[in-house]
Image (cartoon, rainbow, N blue to C red):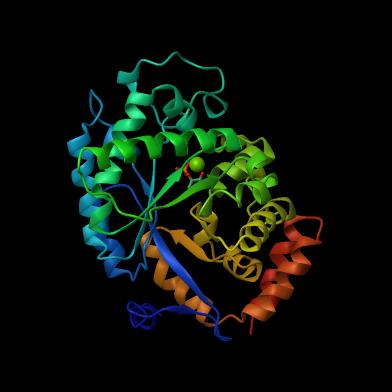
Amino acid sequence: QKAEWAKLVNEKTISIDGHQVELAANIGTPNDLEGVINNGGEGIGLYRTEFLYMGRNELPTEEEQFESYKAVLEGMNGKPVVVRTLDIGGDKELPYLELPKEMNPFLGFRAIRLCLTEQDLFRTQLRALLRASTYGNLKIMFPMIATLDEFREAKTILEEEKQKLVTEGIAVAENIELGIMVEIPSTAVMADQFAKEVDFFSIGTNDLIQYTMAADRMNERVSYLYQPYSPAILRLVKMVIDAAHHEGKWVGMCGEMAGDETAIPLLLGLGLDEFSMSATSILKARSQIAHLSKKEMEDLADKALRMSTTKEVIEAVKAGTSN
Ligand code: PEP
Ligand code: MG
């Protein structure tokens, strides 16, 4: 089986009936690139920039960040690279920011909320990204967006920094796509409105499931509620994909669900455009999709959306994909 997968390293990802999707990788540092290339990643769907900020005593400088972003963009040789701006807070702390302890860190001052307040930190990262943008195919994504106002504010800050660089005579790429993570239910529900203003969505199911089910993703006692295939989650995913496609935008998924064997048939059927997963899952997923019919998965997804429990969905996927 491994030998079978290895043949797919330089192949596209296409279903039996000719529908193409993109399989991208999630990375944390430029060191992860080798694994992405060796496993046939068609792009980076999520570059978690938190690692640049963690395990140290002070913020990374603009120069340090620029070097990392440039390394990833050059390493991917023109393939798309989605960089997520700082998503600190929740499970990921930065002791040197000396933020007050919170009762509910996952519901607290994190990610874009922190960046819109601590603007120096945010602007430094955006400048580093914009400067690196000429070295490859950069797309920028904001995490934990809950309202359109947050997106608009973050976009304005990005545009201000771009304008400053241009005035300073520093080259910036022309058409950098700007997207958001959909990981808060309010944003999934409002996807039709967001879709008019963003260039793409990436569904962050690790958090979207946690917030939809009100079940802490770190707490084992409630982990039975972490149900990627529940009709509730599938309906949200469908809303997001349909809303984006209605506006001609693309949708990725970068939560664990995107690389999950049981979820993949459903996501293909729902029309997901880009699946971003750990590099080591890519070839297996490519092989799986090569054996699936998009048309049949559409029917399967359609049925799943009308089921009442996760168990029924899992059984339907098993039955619908075993031939
Ligand atoms: C997610 O929430 O699904 C996601 C990809 O982001 P993270 O796991 O880094 O919170
Ligand atoms: Mg998240």
The quadrant in which residue 212 appears is top right
4 is higher (above) or lower (below) than 96: below
Residue drawn where x is 33% and y is 71% of the image: 40
Say which of 26 and 186 sits in front.
Answer: 186
Report the side of 129 relative to 158 (left or right): left
Residue placed furthest toward the front: 167
> Residue 120 appears in which quarter of the rendering?
top left
Look at 34% across and 83% down and name the residue there. 7
Q: Residue at x 41, y 31 (%)?
A: 88
Q: Is residue 218 visible?
A: no
Q: Quick one: 68 or 31, which is closer to the camera?
A: 68
Q: Nearer the viewer, residue 133 or 281?
A: 133
Q: Quadrant of residue 10?
A: bottom left
Q: Position of residue 215 (x, y in %)?
A: 64, 36
Which residue is found at the position 53% from the left and 50% from the top? 198
Q: Report how many numbered discs are placed on residues in the image.
A: 0
Q: Is residue 102 left or right of residue 163?
A: right
Q: Is residue 280 visible?
A: yes
Q: Position of residue 287 (x, y in %)?
A: 46, 78
Residue 235 as seen in the image, left or right of residue 206:
right
Q: Nearer the viewer, residue 74 or 309?
A: 74
User: Which part of the image, by quadrant, shows the C terminus?
Assistant: bottom right
- Above-or-below relation of 322 to 148: below
Q: Position of residue 21 (x, y in %)?
A: 50, 72
Q: Position of residue 145 (x, y in %)?
A: 55, 38
- Horizontally, residue 165 falls left or right of residue 323, namely left
Image quarter in which the N terminus is found: bottom left
